[in-house]
Amino acid sequence: MSAAAGILHPRSGNARPGRRAVRCQPGRERGVLVPYDPTNVFARILRDELPSERVYEDDQFVAFRDAAPQAPTHIVLIPRGEAPASPADLREADATWIGRMMVLAARIATDVGLAAEGYRLVINCGTHGGQTVPHLHLHILGGRQLGRLG
């Protein structure tokens, strides 16, 4: 595990305090697109069952370099524990930690040298939105001029 830009923090547990269980039953008022799968690749990375090149971690989040980068710098930021499967599962009560996730993504982008030229933050939702892992996550992309969206 490398300490890119000196931002690696010691681990302090896998569970996020106060995190509620994810409810993913079909037919909910605000329906989920995919249920949470505890065997998903990000859950396995959090349990150290799969290797990752971590660039940041604390008691709530882990950031690592994407195994199939879509830009010269491609970092994935994930919440620890059983996160919502997608943005469709977020609730008002999640505003504090999801806000911290955005602030942290900007800090990581700066720490890895992306701030001067710019970067993109992406959260995909569902199949048509490009989401491939049912664990809420944020992509930090940069290192070159990025193309248009859509």
Image (tube, rainbow, N blue to C red):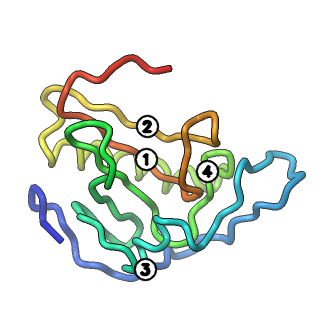
Mark 4 is surrounded, within 10 Å at the Cα level, by few (under 14), some (14 to 19) or many (20 or more) other residues, namely many
Mark 1 is surrounded, within 10 Å at the Cα level, by few (under 14), some (14 to 19) or many (20 or more) other residues, namely some
Q: Residue at x 37, y 79 (%)?
A: 48
The three-letter amino acid code for the residue at tag 3 is Arg
Farthest residue, direction top:
148
- Residues at marks 3 and 2, CA–CA distance in whole angstroms: 24 Å
Query: On screen, 41 above or below 95?
Result: below
Q: Which residue is mark 4?
A: 86
- Quadrant position of the N terminus in the picture: bottom left
Q: Residue at x 80, y 47 (%)?
A: 31
User: In the depicted view, which residue is nearer to us: 64 or 69?
Assistant: 69
Mark 1 or mark 3, which is nearer the start of the sequence?
3
Farthest residue, direction front:
68
Q: Which residue is mark 3?
A: 47
Farthest residue, direction right:
27
User: In the depicted view, which residue is nearer to us: 24 or 34?
Assistant: 34
Please give left or right for residue 25 compared with residue 123 in the image.
Answer: right
* Residue 122 numbered tag: 2
Mark 3 or mark 4, which is nearer the start of the sequence?
3
